[in-house]
Amino acid sequence: MSDISPTPLTGKALLQKVKELAHLPRRETAKRCGYYSQSKDGQVRVNLTDFYDAVLGAKGVPLDPEGTKDGRGREPTFRVSVHKNGQIVIGSTYTEQMNLQPGDEFEIKLGYKHIHLKQMESEEPVEA
């Protein structure tokens, strides 16, 4: 693995490496440019989304041309943590993106290392 970057390449270094590796499949190129993670059991997962974002950024392509940031608060990270009281709070940024309204209900399914929220269909009465 000596030809794999220990940290993800960015900017001109990333573009140069991509050119050098043009003969390889994109997953291998992304991996060799440092866009991968390794699980405890040694499984390698290539992070293609991060790789593509970095390539676009290096080429000067704006990833968010409309500029959804309004300059206030933090950007959504799609990560939350458990509070001291045991609760997990999903911020308004996420509920607004999904157009959720007060009273919307979800079914909770617990997995081994995940929680799945499924929005329940609204039960509006049908008029005859």
Image: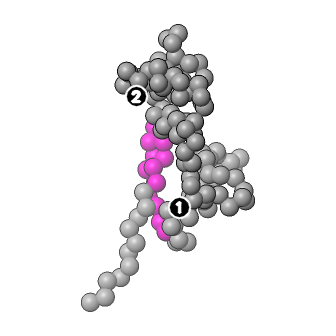
Residue 107 part of the magenta-drawn span? yes
In the rendered image, the residue lying farthest to the left is: 128
Which amino acid type is marked by label 1? Gln
Residue 58: x, y in percent? 57, 36
Residue drawn at the location 68% of the way across and 48% of the way down: 83
Residue drawn at the location 57% of the way across and 48% of the way down: 62
**Foreground of the two, 21 or 105:** 21
Which amino acid type is marked by label 2? Arg
Q: Residues within 10 Å of mark 2 (few under 14, many from 20)?
A: some
Q: Check disc 2 and report the residue beneath it.
A: 26
Q: Check disc 1 and report the residue beneath it.
A: 97
Residue 59: x, y in percent? 55, 38
Residue drawn at the location 59% of the way across and 28% of the way down: 12
Vertical order, 127 against 104 (above or below): below
What residue span does the magenta drawing correspond to? 104-117
Position of 48 compared to 57: left or right?
A: left
Q: Residues within 10 Å of mark 1 (few under 14, many from 20)?
A: few
- Work out whether mark 2 precedes mark 1 in sequence or the reverse, and give the earlier one: 2
Visible in this render: residue 113?
no
Could you tell me which secondary element the residue under label 2 belongs to?
A: helix
Position of 67 compared to 44: left or right?
A: right
Residue 71: x, y in percent? 72, 58
How far apart marks 2 and 1 lie (CA) works out to: 31 Å
Vertical order, 108 against 125 (above or below): above
Visible in this render: residue 114?
yes
